[in-house]
Image (cartoon, grey):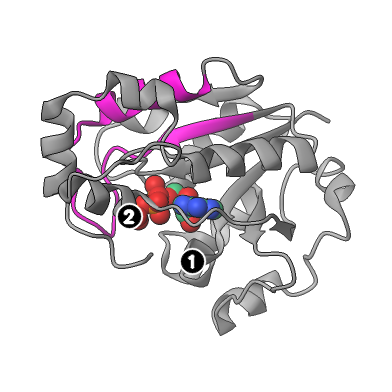
Amino acid sequence: MKAIGIFGGAFAPFHNGHLRVAIEARDKLDLNQVRLIPTAHAAHRPDSRISPLRRLEWLRLAVRREKNLIPDDREIQRAGVSYTVDTLSELRQDFPRAALVLIMGSDAFEHFHTWSRWQQIIDLAHVAVITRPGSEPRPSAETREILAGRRAPDAAALHRQAGGLWLPLEMPLLDISSTRIRRLLKQERSVRALVPDAILNAMTAADVAALTQDNDATQH
Ligand code: ATP
């Protein structure tokens, strides 16, 4: 069965932490592709001053030479708030027989029960939770209840059914966040080696000005 990873975020900007997540998920879970999906309008935070199309352009530059990492603009094309459950429903229609694997950070997983129609998400897709080696994801009581008995024994199990399982995906985390990058830019300090060079080379003074006006996220 074909297995497709889905990794979404504001990507304001996309950084090397995001890139490593996509690469490690592709390789460790043996995914045929990972679709990277920039959010148009997030439900829980103000829109970035950087337009969705500009964030998509950066993403394209960053993964141009990466095999099977695919920028996906479906949330940008769709009007309104970008709900993951709607994105997964669309992907399920596009790929009726594939295993879908939603990749999320452990911070996102802790708040999973606050996502719109979150119980539907686990029926539409598997969930892979990025976890530091040696630590365990910490789902809320609500999430734990719904996920009870659904832990995949290994990555191969994700390829045997279309969705409905979850598993921790261990990887050494890079201490990088878009918030940190925006802060460094604000202080006129270098962000080299945190952001892919292809993005840095394309970043204009206007981009930097817009990024530095974005509010700090509550997490990271
Ligand atoms: P911000 O600092 O603006 O919140 P961010 O760096 O967390 O941004 P997002 O675009 O909000 O990036 O995140 C998309 C996804 O990437 C989330 O699931 C988040 O947990 C995950 N993520 C972000 N940075 C890292 C990292 N360094 N390692 C692993 N996962 C990450």
Instruction: Say which residue label 1 marks.
Output: 107
The residue at 36%/66% (across/down) is 219
Residue 182 makes an appearance in the image: yes
Q: Quadrant of residue 92?
A: top right
Q: Secondary structure at mark 2?
A: helix
Q: Picture coordinates of residue 181 (x, y %)?
A: 31, 48
Q: What is the number of callouts on the image?
A: 2
Magenta-drawn stretch contains 133: no
Q: In the displayed image of the protein, which residue is found farthest to the front?
A: 189
Q: Secondary structure at mark 1?
A: helix
| Some atom of ligand 1 lies within 8 Å of the CB belonging to the residue at label 2 | yes
Q: Picture coordinates of residue 62 (x, y %)?
A: 46, 24
Q: Which residues are magenta?
A: 34-63
Q: Amino acid at mark 2?
A: Arg
Quarter of the picture containing the C terminus is bottom left
Q: Picture coordinates of residue 117 (x, y %)?
A: 46, 59
Instruction: Say which residue label 2 marks.
Output: 180
Q: Quadrant of residue 204?
A: top left
